[in-house]
Image (spheres, grey):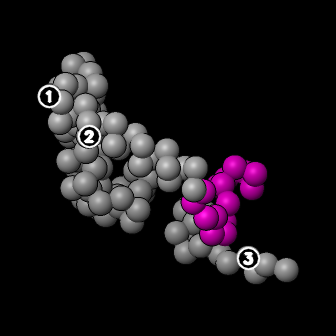
Amino acid sequence: EKEVVVSPWSARIWSMHYYDWATRPLYKVPMTPGFAQGVTKVHRDLKTVFHNKDTVTTKPFLVITSRGDDVLVSQETLSRAVWIGPARTEIELNDNGHDIFLSGD
């Protein structure tokens, strides 16, 4: 029998917002190898496009990140946005959590 471990990150989110139990776990869920491989492949492909002096898009796009993110590093997010295209608007929030749309600020 496996022990269910409550994730501090999930518990914090659950304490601030109501969710249907079927849509967001309260316990730690491992990242699957397929998800990790998919993210890695997309990053490699974007980097290749950038190094070939090409762009994914020339249309404007918005990048929102936060220095207070407890999952991603804000500077890495901004540096990866360069790979997508030049017509970007970058917004770096100061204290918001990972899911900026759920933050109380």
Mark 3 or 1, which is nearer the eye? 1
Q: Which residue is mark 2?
A: 47
Say which mark, if any, is on residue 4. Answer: 3
Query: x and y percent of residue 66 in the render?
Result: 29, 55
Q: Is residue 47 visible?
A: yes
Q: Secondary structure at mark 2?
A: helix
- Secondary structure beneath label 1: loop
Q: Specify the segment rendered in magenta.
A: 18-32
Q: Nearer the viewer, residue 27 or 52?
A: 52
Q: Amino acid at mark 3?
A: Val
Mark 1 → mark 2, Cα distance in angstroms = 10 Å
Report the label total.
3
- Describe residue 78's horizontal placement relative to residue 5 as left or right: left
Q: What residue sits 41% from the left and 57% below the top?
A: 98
Location of mark 1 (residue) = 53
Q: Label 3 crowding class (10 Å Cα cut-off): few <14, some 14-19, many 20+? A: few
Residue 2 percent location from the top left of the image: 79, 78
Give coordinates of residue 85: x percent, y percent.
Answer: 21, 29
> On the image, which quarter does residue 90 sit in?
top left
Q: Is residue 24 above or below residue 29?
A: above
* CA distance separating discs 3 and 1: 48 Å
